[in-house]
Image: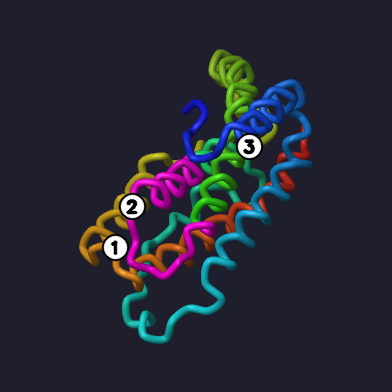
Amino acid sequence: MGLRSVCGWPVCHLSLFVTGALSLECNLLYVHLPGVIWHNLALLNSMSHWFPMECVRESRAFELPDDILSRTQPRKRDIKEALYEISVQAFNIFTRYTFQAPWEEEHLKRIRIGLDQQLQYLEPCLTEGEKENEDVEEAGEGERKHPGATVPRPNKLELKRYFHRIHRFLRAKKYSRCAGEVVRVEIRRCFYYFQKFTAFLRRK
């Protein structure tokens, strides 16, 4: 995706340095990524201290596909790809739309920078498993013997449909305060869901 233009030069310059360092140490992604996700969860929480009672009736079941990752042995690349897709979508939501929610501009700026950093941690490491995937495909029948080989790749189509429902909801509600709050809580739920899978990135 490249560097997104949501931060000033000093911050972006630092982000470029961090990204370059991480591209050399993708094996340490499991060390850095959980902290970045927790930081973004804290930013999402700080945007609103409570969910407005008048917005409860606007709540929707967007149906995050909970089988997108195996609950027993998800592959590292599956986790990275799915989390990357969710991070891109969340970044786009908070960047493209103007919400009527009373969020402070500083909070929006911080979550944009936080999501941008999360993407920069993931981007250099997405290619890490490409060679492994090619080897598995060439293995033919031997694929069943590969640890975790029976675990399906993330269903990207289901993820896209999930976010399409969110985008459609926002448009229908004209980016109202309640729509913004509902989506903020939903994105927070996504990151909580994926946070528990980051421990699998530690495995070789």
Sequence-earlier tag: 1 or 3: 3
Q: CA distance from mark 1 to mark 3?
A: 29 Å
Q: Mark 1: give few (<14), some (14-19) or many (20+) Cα within 10 Å.
A: some
Q: Which residue is mark 3?
A: 11
Q: Secondary structure at mark 2?
A: loop
* Residue type of the residue flagged with mark 3: Val
Name, please, the residue furthest toward the left.
172
Q: Nearer the viewer, residue 63 or 116?
A: 116
| Residue 121 quadrant | top right
Residue 204: where, in percent of width, then height? 77, 32
The residue under label 2 is which amino acid type?
Answer: Tyr
Q: Nearer the viewer, mark 1 or mark 3?
A: 3
Marks 2/1: CA–CA distance: 7 Å
Give the colour scheme shown. Answer: rainbow
Classed neighbour count for the residue bearing mark 2: other residues with Cα under 10 Å, few (<14), some (14–19), many (≥20): some
Q: What is the distance, in whole Å, between disc 2 and disc 3 at their CAs?
A: 23 Å
Query: Dot 2 corresponds to which residue?
Result: 97
- Report helix, strand or loop for mark 3: helix
Compare marks 2 and 1 and give the one earlier in the sequence: 2
The nearer-to-camera label among 2 and 3 is 3
Please provide the residue range marked out in magenta: 85-107
* Image quadrant where residue 98 sits: bottom left
* Left or right for 76, reference 163: right
The residue that disc 1 covers is: 175
Residues tagged 2 and 1 counted as in contact (Cβ below 8 A): yes
Say if the magenta span includes residue 96. yes
